[in-house]
Structures are given as structure tokens and as C-alpha cells.
Amino acid sequence: MDSNNPIDFTGRVVVVTGGTKGIGAAIAEAFLGAGADVVVCGRNEPGSLPGSNGRHAVFLPADVRDPAAAARLVDGAVDRFGRLDVLVNNAGGSPDAEAATVSPRFVEKIVALNLLAPFYVAQAANRVMQTQSGGGSVINIGSVSAHDPQPGTAAYSAAKAGLLTLTRALALEWAPKVRVNHITTGLIRTESAAAVYGEDGGAAVARVVPMERMAVPQDVAGACLYLAGGLASYVNGADLAVHGGGEFPSRYLAVKSGETG
């Protein structure tokens, strides 16, 4: 990395879980554009890989809910590139489900993907990063649901709240060689979000956000570049909110609606 340009990741190696589409692909492309070598993973090989400036990410198959597979992912990245500097735990998500009737198997899968998997991959990454002179950086992609749960997200919200606390705990244990930080994401406009918020890009939903728009994946990618780079060399255990200011309180919206109705 060029000390005069903290966004230059030339010679650095980045792993992005769930990095084949959506937010993960945007994160992978941002690091590629900054000069890094990038490894992405998923359970199934994608039709195309994230790329930037004629360079593409390397795909390694992995179900990161399996501790052994998580370790193989990290080992594979190191075998290929000789080191690991940044881990972005991006894989996650959940469909809505009623807490009163959801099955134990569903809950186990959601907690495994959103909490246990980041722990497993971070453990493997830390073992490598602690041996490197420059250490490393772990970034956990969380959700506003950890702070403000919505109906139908009980298991997901609990897992994401756990991820935030896990971040703070690992930051205490692994510093100073390895910094561990968290990004709280809000409403993000992706292909999958269109089915939930509408093809208009969630215009109605955007009205409840102070920034007057939903985030795009590149907003999260930019935050990852900051947390992983030299500008954030003293940032550890942080929760960086990338949610446009959150959402207006319902009582405020009710009053505004009354004024314009």
C-alpha cells in the first residue's frame, strides 16, 4: 500500500464472503479498483465474477457456515496469493418469518449464516493476520435490524445484534495486529430489494430516510475501503452507520402527513 494514498491496496489480498453478487460484488469491485487481489466465495460458482479495470476476483467455493470450509477458504486465499490483509464478512440475510411459527431448523440456519459463519471465517483469518508484519483488518457487514428490529426478523435481528457484539469482543482480543470493525447497513437498493420495495427503486420507502434515497451497494463498498485502509488505522471496534441517517420517527411522519393531507 502506498503510504501517500491510503486507498491504494496494491499488493494486498482481500476475501469477501458472499462476494459474487449484490453488495458483496460491489465491495469486491471496489477493492479490485483500488489494486487489491480479491477472493470471493459462495456455495455455487457464479456465471460471472466481479471485475474492475480489466481485473477479476478469484472464486473459491465455500459454505462458510461450516468451520472447516471457512478455514479452507482462508487457506485457499493464502495459498494463491501468499497473505491475507482484509476479510469482509458480507454473507448473510434472511427471508421474513413469523417468530411464533418459525421452525427450529430455520432459526439455526439464520443464526449460522449471520453470526456463526462470520466468527468461523474471522478465526481463520486472524490466525494468518497475526503472523504478518502489517496485521490485518476484519469488517463485519451488519444491519440496522440489530438496533431496530422489524416484524418478521426475530432470528435475523438477534443474529445481527450478536454480530455487533462479536465485533466489539474480537476488537478487544485481537488488537493491535488485527482491527475488527462493523458496518450497520440500512435500506439498500439491490436486485433482490426490488421485489420488496418496488421497481421504482423504493421511492416511497426512501421518503422515510433523511438522505431521501435508499443506499446503493457502492455506499457500503466505500465504507469498507475506509475501514480497511490507512485512514482508519486507529479505528477498532467501531460501528460505522451507513444508513442515510436512519429513519424518521413514525410520529414525525404522522404529523407531516397530516400537514400535507
Image: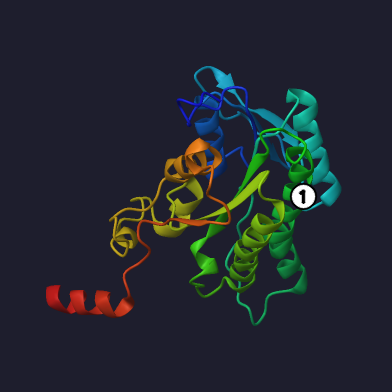
The spot of residue 182 in percent (x, y) is 56, 54
Q: Position of residue 180 (x, y in %)?
A: 62, 51
| Camera-side residue of 6 and 149 | 6
Secondary structure under tag 1 reads: helix
Report the residue at 77% width, 52% height from top: 120
The relative height of residue 106 versus residue 91 in the rendered view (above or below) is below
Q: Is residue 113 left or right of residue 10?
A: right
Q: Residue 41: name its quadrant.
A: top right
Q: Is 43 or 131 nearer to us in this picture? A: 131
Residue beneath the point at 29% across and 55% down? 211
Extreme top residue here? 54
**How many marks can you see?**
1
Q: Quadrant of residue 218?
A: top left
Q: Residue at x 60, y 57 (%)?
A: 93
Residue type pointed to by label 1? Gln
135 shown above or below 146: above
Which residue lies most toward the right here? 68
Q: Which residue is mark 1?
A: 123
Up the image or down, 103 lies above or below 4; here it is below
**Residue 96 % position (x, y):** 57, 67
* Residue at 35 percent of width and 60 percent of height: 245
Q: Nearer the viewer, residue 193 or 76?
A: 76
